[in-house]
């Protein structure tokens, strides 16, 4: 499950997301950039960093929610700005921490929003809803419920289903599982990774959780102050990275794991 | 049933229909302006603050004044239209009432609309944008449905305000449930006042409950509540409006009246004669004094009774007093030349402004004429009707005799007589045809310097009806036919405290004589 290679058989993977020298500042303060990042088809990339590192702004530049001040963006080989932002966003799945289910719509209606925006016919939408509920492992009888009647984990499963509904090839996720308790969080993360592989998606996930990034992503981009500190496979980053900040960051889970082991053994854990 | 209650019931279908029509139109117009404005305001702070500020400012204008302000505004606009396009529009009645109430209804809808849209969960808005909704889709799929309960609460408030404020449309010539209140207040017919208040309160409560049902249906997502509320509103409005559909065709005249008993009776008298001749008559009562003449000149009413001195000083702006016949002749020539208005002729009595005191008080002070009053005035209080103190007659009187009272207070005429009886006022600006002068044993002070002009009651005809023989033939027999004694007793039958008559009854008794 962990660190699966990109799907084989497609030769040199197509460049799906290309950010070239993009920069964004708000009232004189630079939030991102200049930053260059290329993501290939079927990659699962984690943008890892603390708050204020520019990872969410970078994510939102990909689907045009935040227009860059400088630099160029190409999505699926098309320059951004080639079409209105909303058209681009209809082809990219978007999941975020607060989920943002529309509270006046049932689960089925929430899931149907993307297909309706893409002007699918009713029968196709209805069939798609059943498929998606199965994919995200929700019982079909939640379809008629309002979001308020669901648990937090169920709600985020609906959020994932809604993002996948219009069959996007790219998924953007902003701290998608951040608000969930650890057990549900891990299960949901693993389930999503399976979907990513099964559907052949390209996923960019923003997270501040090193463990989550390590366990889910094929590639981790460590960000700080709007720039890229490190960019590599989890295995590569874990082994004595040149940058001391990255080294300290990657060391955290192992240090914590050692302390937890020690706790279990009844030893003093002050170190 | 009491005669006054029965009379009130007979008027209800028409008053209610007009009231509901006005409120519905104002609310509909207010909603269709405020909601788009709320959407724009929720998107841009640059629009939001000015829009909310102006709407709040309008709300601070007393609603009666707001209604009153629209009349001169529309009159000026109508005059402009007449010059530019050769066709004006009625500046009295429905139009000014509709515009004022529309403005009045806007604040709650605007405020709740902005609050409702801005109050939508930011996560839902981010999801809508992130999924690729356009601005319009985000508005109609997400923001408006989520803001609907809050917006509906605003509509509810607006409906209650509008229905209440619509009672104030009466003085600008729009029939409403306010007609009960205004004429009831004037003639101390408390049955009418209560009837008007009660009917508008019941109407407001019913609208509030039905809109509340829709609001709770939106909040709790209960479609049956939304349907029940909507169907209730539609059926209620249809029932209330149905009398309007039954209006018969035929010649139709609009008879005006100012806001006191004598005017109600004379308007009734003219209306009854026209109806007896087979015409249909609309009564426009409770018009302001200056409003009435302008409405006639503009053709918004066809006929009403005014007083020669009032026209002489207020309309023509004259300060001299050449005597009764000369004033009448001057008016007839001048009004026709200036405005095309026909002075059909004097009814035969005067209703003059005069200063009056309680006889016992006058005797104690040794006052018989305004001359005697001048020296004592600084220790006395003057009570007047609502307009006397701002009329040229008062200026003339004050200058002629050097009058300066300790206190000058304006009352509704009814309450002015009360104030005199209670001793709150020592001197009042009375009307010489008022039945209460004899009944209350009042002394009318002489005016040896003739500072006050004569006040012959005259029938005025609007420019468009000057050659309307049907109208003229019906009204001409009234010229010279009413003595001051007959008018006084007719007035008193409305103004007295017990055994009150309606204006229609008083008019019938006057016609017999």
Image (tube, helix red, strand yellow):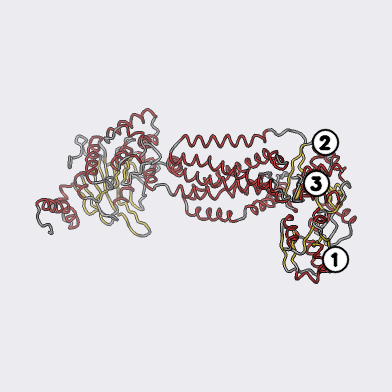
Closer to us: A184 or B368: B368
Residue B15 % position (x, y): 67, 41
Along the polypeptide, which appears first: circle 2 or circle 3? 3
Residue displayed at 54% across by 34% down: B231
Query: Looking at the image, is mark 2 or mark 3 nearer the viewer?
Result: 3
Residue identified by numbered label 1: B368
Closer to us: B513 or B371: B513
Residue identified by numbered label 2: B277
**Left or right, A40 with reference to B306:** left
Subunit under mark 2: B
Query: Element under label 1?
Result: loop
Residue displayed at 38% across by 59% down: A27
Residue displayed at 39% across by 29% down: A122
Q: Residues within 10 Å of mark 2 (few under 14, many from 20)?
A: few
Residue identified by numbered label 3: B266
Residue B92 % position (x, y): 70, 47
Are marks 2 and 1 in one subunit? yes
Subunit under mark 3: B
Subunit under mark 1: B
Q: Is residue A104 visible?
A: yes
Residue B279 % position (x, y): 79, 36
Residue A192 % position (x, y): 25, 39
Q: Quadrant of residue A140?
A: top left
Alpha carbon separation for disc pair 2 and 1: 48 Å
Query: Element under label 3?
Result: helix
Along the polypeptide, which appears first: circle 3 or circle 1? 3
């Amino acid at each position: 499950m962990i660190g699966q290679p990109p799907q084989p058989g497609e030769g040199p993977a197509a460049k799906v997301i290309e950010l070239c020298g993009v920069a964004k500042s708000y009232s004189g303060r630079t939030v991102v950039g200049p930053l260059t990042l290329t993501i290939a088809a079927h990659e699962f990339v984690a943008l890892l960093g603390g708050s204020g590192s520019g990872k969410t702004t970078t994510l939102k530049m990909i689907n045009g929610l935040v227009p860059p001040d400088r630099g160029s963006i190409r999505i699926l080989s098309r320059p951004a700005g080639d079409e209105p932002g909303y058209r681009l966003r209809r082809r990219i799945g978007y999941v975020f921490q607060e989920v943002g289910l529309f509270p006046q719509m049932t689960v089925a209606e929430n899931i149907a929003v993307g297909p309706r925006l893409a002007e699918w016919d009713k029968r196709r939408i209805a069939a798609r809803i059943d498929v998606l509920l199965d994919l995200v492992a929700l019982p079909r009888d939640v379809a008629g419920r309002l979001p308020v009647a669901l648990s937090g984990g169920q709600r985020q499963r609906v959020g994932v289903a809604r993002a996948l509904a219009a069959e996007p090839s790219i998924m953007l996720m902003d701290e998608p599982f951040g608000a969930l308790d650890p057990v549900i969080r891990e299960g949901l993360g693993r389930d999503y990774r399976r979907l990513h592989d099964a559907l052949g998606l390209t996923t960019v996930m923003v997270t501040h959780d090193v463990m989550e990034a390590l366990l889910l992503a094929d590639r981790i981009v460590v960000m700080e102050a709007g720039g890229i500190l490190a960019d590599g496979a989890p295995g590569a980053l874990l082994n004595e990275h040149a940058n001391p900040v990255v080294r300290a960051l990657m060391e955290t889970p192992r240090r914590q794991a050692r302390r937890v082991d020690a706790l279990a053994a009844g030893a003093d854990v002050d170190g | 049933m009491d005669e006054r209650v029965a009379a009130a019931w007979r008027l209800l279908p028409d008053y209610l229909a007009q009231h509901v029509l006005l409120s519905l139109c104002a609310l509909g117009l207010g909603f269709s302006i405020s909601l788009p404005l709320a959407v724009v305001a929720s998107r841009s702070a640059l629009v939001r603050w000015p829009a909310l500020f102006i709407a709040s400012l309008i709300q601070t204008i007393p609603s009666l004044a707001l209604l009153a302000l629209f009349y001169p505004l529309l009159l000026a606009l109508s005059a402009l239209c007449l010059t530019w396009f050769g066709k004006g529009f009625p500046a009295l009645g429905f139009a000014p009432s509709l515009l004022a109430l529309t403005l009045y209804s806007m604040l709650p809808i605007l405020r709740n609309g902005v609050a409702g849209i801005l109050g939508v969960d930011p996560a839902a808005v981010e999801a809508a944008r992130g999924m690729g909704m356009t601005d319009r889709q985000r508005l109609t799929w997400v923001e408006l449905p989520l803001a609907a309960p809050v917006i509906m609460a605003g509509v509810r408030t607006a409906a209650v305000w509008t229905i209440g404020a619509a009672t104030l449309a009466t003085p600008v010539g729009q029939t409403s449930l306010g007609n009960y209140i205004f004429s009831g207040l004037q003639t101390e017919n408390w049955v009418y006042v209560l009837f008007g208040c009660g009917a508008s309160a019941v109407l407001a409560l019913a609208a509030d409950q039905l809109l509340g049902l829709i609001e709770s249906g939106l909040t709790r997502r209960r479609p049956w509540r939304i349907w029940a509320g909507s169907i209730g509103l539609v059926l209620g409005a249809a029932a209330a409006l149905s009398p309007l559909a039954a209006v018969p065709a035929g010649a139709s005249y609009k008879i005006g009246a100012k806001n006191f008993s004598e005017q109600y009776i004379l308007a009734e008298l003219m209306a009854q004669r026209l109806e007896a001749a087979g015409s249909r008559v609309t009564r426009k009562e409770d018009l302001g004094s200056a409003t009435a003449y302008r409405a006639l000149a503009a053709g918004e009413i066809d006929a009403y009774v005014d007083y020669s001195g009032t026209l002489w000083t207020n309309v023509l702006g004259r300060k001299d007093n050449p005597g009764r016949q000369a004033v009448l002749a001057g008016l007839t020539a001048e009004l026709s030349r200036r405005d095309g208005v026909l002075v059909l002729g004097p009814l035969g009595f005067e209703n003059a402004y005069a200063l009056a005191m309680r006889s016992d008080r006058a005797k104690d002070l040794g006052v018989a004429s305004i001359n005697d009053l001048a020296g004592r005035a600084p220790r006395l209080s003057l009570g007047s009707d609502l307009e006397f103190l701002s009329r040229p007659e008062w200026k003339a009187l004050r200058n002629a005799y050097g009058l300066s009272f300790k206190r000058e207070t304006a009352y509704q005429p009814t309450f002015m007589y009360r104030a005199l009886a209670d001793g709150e006022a020592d001197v009042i600006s009375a009307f010489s045809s008022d039945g209460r002068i004899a009944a209350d044993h009042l002394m009318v002070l002489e005016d040896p310097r003739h500072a006050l002009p004569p006040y012959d009651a005259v029938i005025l005809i609007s420019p468009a009806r000057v050659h309307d023989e049907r109208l003229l033939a019906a009204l001409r027999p009234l010229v010279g036919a009413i003595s001051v004694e007959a008018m006084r007793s007719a007035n008193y039958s409305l103004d007295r405290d017990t055994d009150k008559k309606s204006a229609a009854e008083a008019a019938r008794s006057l016609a017999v004589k």
